[in-house]
Amino acid sequence: MNGLRLVLALTIGASSLSATARCEFPDEGNMPLRRAVSRIEMLPEVHEWHRSMVEKGSKPQYVVRLDEPVREAGKCYWPVEVRAEGKLWRRYFISPDGKSIRP
């Protein structure tokens, strides 16, 4: 991923979300967002797909959707959309601490 320009798009709709629907945002600056994208990028299937898109001349994008958190078994996850050429390839769900990823 070095040398490649990655686009991290953030959509924050905090004013429209109730406190119970939002994930707590760790007090670590932008590190949780960078960690979320990096963890998704390191998944073997994403890494291969990313390489193939770059070889085709496309610029992969990773979109962390803070406005659409998902709760599962009491745990909060941020959706991370993996895109290229304006099309969604896959969506993953990652916990704000980066320790849990779900396809």
Image (spheres, helix red, strand yellow):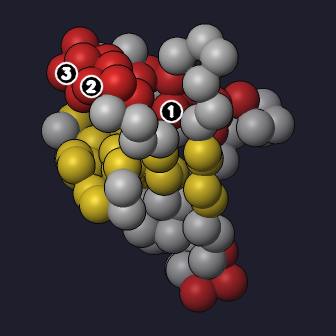
Residue 102, horizontal then vertical, whole percent: 22, 36
Residue 67, horizontal then vertical, whole percent: 51, 69
Q: Nearer the viewer, residue 15 or 12?
A: 12
In the drawing, does residue 38 fall left or right of residue 27? Answer: left
Look at the numbered disc 3 and give the secondary structure of its residue.
helix
Task: Look at the image and tell me whether residue 25 can be seen.
Answer: yes
Calculate the distance from the C-alpha at mark 1 to the C-alpha at mark 3. 14 Å
Q: Amino acid at mark 3?
A: Glu
| Residue indicated by mark 1 | 37
Calculate the distance from the C-alpha at mark 1 to the C-alpha at mark 2. 18 Å
Which residue is drawn at the image coordinates 42% and 67% (left, top)? 68
Q: Give the crowd class for mark 2: few <14, some 14-19, many >=20 residues within 10 Å.
A: few
Which residue is drawn at the image coordinates 41% and 41% (left, top)? 58
- Mark nearest the camera among 2 and 3 is 2
Task: Look at the image and tell me whether residue 95 can be seen.
Answer: no
Which residue is drawn at the image coordinates 29% and 60% (left, top)? 87
Q: Quadrant of residue 26?
A: top right
Q: Amino acid at mark 2?
A: Ser
Residue 38, horizontal then vertical, whole percent: 51, 23
| Residue indicated by mark 2 | 52
- Mark nearest the camera among 1 and 2 is 2
| Residue indicated by mark 3 | 45
Vertical placement of residue 72 versus 12, above or below: above
Which residue is drawn at the image coordinates 65% and 17% (left, top)? 3
Residue 22, horizontal then vertical, whole percent: 52, 64
Q: Nearer the viewer, residue 39 or 7?
A: 7
